Amino acid sequence: MVSMKEELSFFSGKEGNVSGIHYVSKDIQISTGACQTEQLREGDILIVGDGFGGLLGGLNAGKNDVILCRADSTGGYTFSTLLHIPEAKKIQGLTLIEDDVIVGNTQLSSGNFLFLKKNEGGNGPQGNGENCVYLYETESFRTSLLFDGNSVGFHSKLTGIELIERDTVAGGEYLEAGTVLLSAKNRFTINNTEVDPHDIFAVHVKPTGQATMSILFDGEDLGLNNVGAKIDGLSLNVEQQTISPDNTIASGVFDATAGTLALHGTKFDSLGNVGDDIRDQLDWSKLVWDVDSDDCATADITFTEDDVESAVIKSDTELVIHLKESKIDSITGNANYAALGGAVDTLDIGNGFSVDSAGVASTKDGLVGGELVTITPPGNIHLSNSTLNDPYESQIYPCRELSTFFLIR
């Protein structure tokens, strides 16, 4: 048990210089070696440095070791080597990926690390530049280049790094998930604005490989320019401010043959990534099929999670709910289904039906009397709740791409 303040007060000169730091913001288990794991706790601190020469309670750590600093009940700290990144001769900065997130077109998985490295000879992954960001995968021990600073517009050596895994507000600034925060050793220019060693800048890499950059923190605001200060490492820990998903729902299409209820609206990708099944996230009690659109005068069709096979985000404008066969039969067997009851059916959705992966409910997804189009098998088709029955037993072929139907005799 050692005082963190006491130990860090000895770090001076080259020996024992802390070059990177990460604050663990939630409990997370990571792989640390073959068949080995470590349970990290909220409040743990991870550091890297030039080697600590027996400091940190006598721990003998190298320049590419990640050190776990854990508080104990007495107010002291214990120190241990968490893992070793072999392809980095010296780690200049690092951040733990605490939630799955996409940067550019690369899917990053929780439990892995992004890091910066200092060139000290030897072979390494593609790039080998001090203005590059690297990914270290803890289960496979694989190091790869995430992005090269030269390709996204900055050429200075990097000193600090932090990853934004979910949409966050920090200091009044909105940070989109997938944004990388960086600090640099030397002055350079972004969009005609100078970035100094005492600044923090935000980089958002697009799937195309292009990047947008902006200054998040200007050290001059705190007078850091007057004392020649440089940011040598950074870790963002903000009190989580709830950011509600901002999707809306405008209408629905029920296809009895496909067994789907497709909801159409905007920003469904604020609930998760396209392709995600979010069945377990949604509040099914707030989805109501208003039979005859008479506000419960006719018994409505309601839903539970057990009625649903999956709910997949198809795009930012479509969420497709795959219903179980028993639920489909229950809907189509309703005596007042679609226009059979003499009036159109509609959708009523309460605010908070949509919930994101963090458990935050939408405040904008409510819908009252929303349009509901129903499509049933050939021979009895309901389009916009108007029944078309063919007395000549014609075949009806839906052509959804043209949003119309052909009747062939």
Image: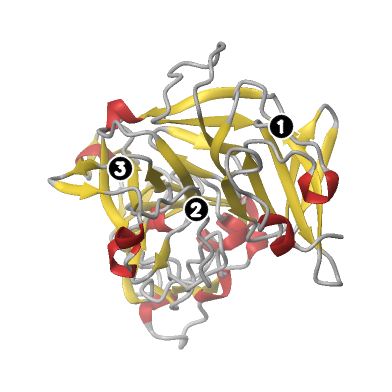
Q: Which residue is mark 2?
A: 234
Marks 3/2: CA distance? 74 Å
User: For numbered disc 3, what is the local secondary structure?
Assistant: loop
Marks 1/2: CA distance? 20 Å
Q: Nearer the viewer, residue 378 or 155?
A: 155
Q: Nearer the viewer, residue 211 or 365?
A: 211
Residue at the spot x=50%, y=36% of the render?
107
- Which amino acid, mark 1? Gly
Question: Which quarter of the rendered picture does the C terminus lie within?
Answer: top left
Q: Is residue 173 visible?
A: yes
Q: Which callout, 3 or 2, points to the residue nearer the camera?
A: 2
Residue at the spot x=87%, y=60% of the render?
1
In percent of width and height, residue 146 lies at: 45, 29
Q: Earlier in the sequence, mark 1 or mark 2?
A: 1
Q: Which callout, 1 or 2, points to the residue nearer the camera?
A: 1
**Left or right: 187, with 75 as reference point:** left
Q: Earlier in the sequence, mark 3 or mark 2?
A: 2
Mark 3 crowd level (few <14, some 14–19, many ≥20, 10 Å Cα):
few
Q: Nearer the viewer, residue 247 or 261?
A: 247
In percent of width and height, residue 135 lies at: 54, 31
Residue 191: which quarter of the image? top left
- Which amino acid, mark 3? Tyr
User: For numbered disc 1, what is the local secondary structure?
Assistant: loop
In percent of width and height, residue 213 lies at: 26, 46
Q: Earlier in the sequence, mark 3 or mark 1?
A: 1
Residue at far front of view? 13
Residue at the spot x=40%, y=67% of the render?
169
Marks 3/1: CA distance? 84 Å
Asked whether the beta carbons under mark 3 and mark 2 sit within 8 Å of each other, the answer is no
The numbered disc on residue 62 is 1
Q: Which residue is mark 3?
A: 392
Q: Is residue 309 visible?
A: no
